[in-house]
Amino acid sequence: MTIGQIHNRGSFLDNLAKNLGRERRSEVVKPQWQHNPQWEVYKGYSQDELVEVLKNQCKLIHTEVHETVTSELSTLIPHLIKQYGGKSVVTWDDPRFEEAGLKEIGDEDITHHVWDPEGGEENLSFSATADVGITFSDTTLAESGTVVLYSDKGKGRAVSLLPVVYIAIIPKSTIVPRMTQAAKHIHDKIENGEQVASCVNFISGPSNSADIEMNLIVGVHGPVKATYVIVDDL
């Protein structure tokens, strides 16, 4: 079969429509809903008000929160790493780290690995044993305390999933009310023909599970602890 070619799609859809008792639809128009309550949640909130919503939600998802400014990040992040007893750190290959003065986090006590797009297994091996993983948040959902990460060649998923401690640096400008705004952002990029991430990760605090009799257990897999660092970049 030729790569990228779909065979017999037309006949399959024709048969499906026939069994549904209607004509095959070649164009679908998005309906105009009379009510859109999803847009009313935290409508009109300022960034400062959304920060408070986010901080309150973090109390419920067992996530520590720090607030700072960009000029203080290069001091705060190493402090947090050492506070958690971190000896090894993995970060994205992301220009925002250099802009924030975090290009070189390591010292004689901390080994720092930057995700290498050509690194392959080396990246995964380091991440699997790293004490701390650090990324920037691309979009942040105040309602659920969620950081949204758009994967890219220098932004491996393992950085936020495998280390014991996960630190998310959250630019204040990235905070939106809820999932509604994140979904619209992705939808708009697709509508405009822009490249979208092959994987979008939604992370709400440390790993947890309530599968057994609804008893919440935090730190069952993935990051045992999560910390959000909100940076006033406005």
Image (cartoon, rainbow, N blue to C red):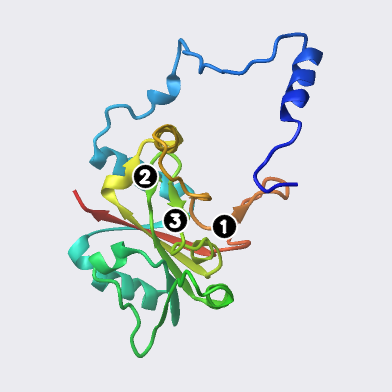
Residue type at the position of mark 1:
Ser
Going from N to C along the chain, the mark reached first, 1 or 3, is 3
Q: Residue 219 carries which label?
A: none
Cα distance between the residues tagged 2 and 1: 18 Å
Residue type at the position of mark 2:
Leu
Q: Foreground: 61 or 105?
A: 105
State which quadrant residue 16 falls in.
Answer: top right
Q: Which mark is residue 207?
A: 1
The residue that disc 2 covers is 54
Dot 2 alpha-carbon crowd within 10 angstroms: few under 14, some 14 to 19, many 20 or more: many
Residue 188, position in %: x, y? 40, 33
State which quadrant residue 40 falls in.
Answer: top left
Going from N to C along the chain, the mark reached first, 2 or 3, is 2
Residue type at the position of mark 3:
Thr
Cα distance between the residues tagged 2 and 3: 10 Å
Secondary structure state at the residue bearing disc 3:
loop
Cα distance between the residues tagged 1 and 3: 10 Å
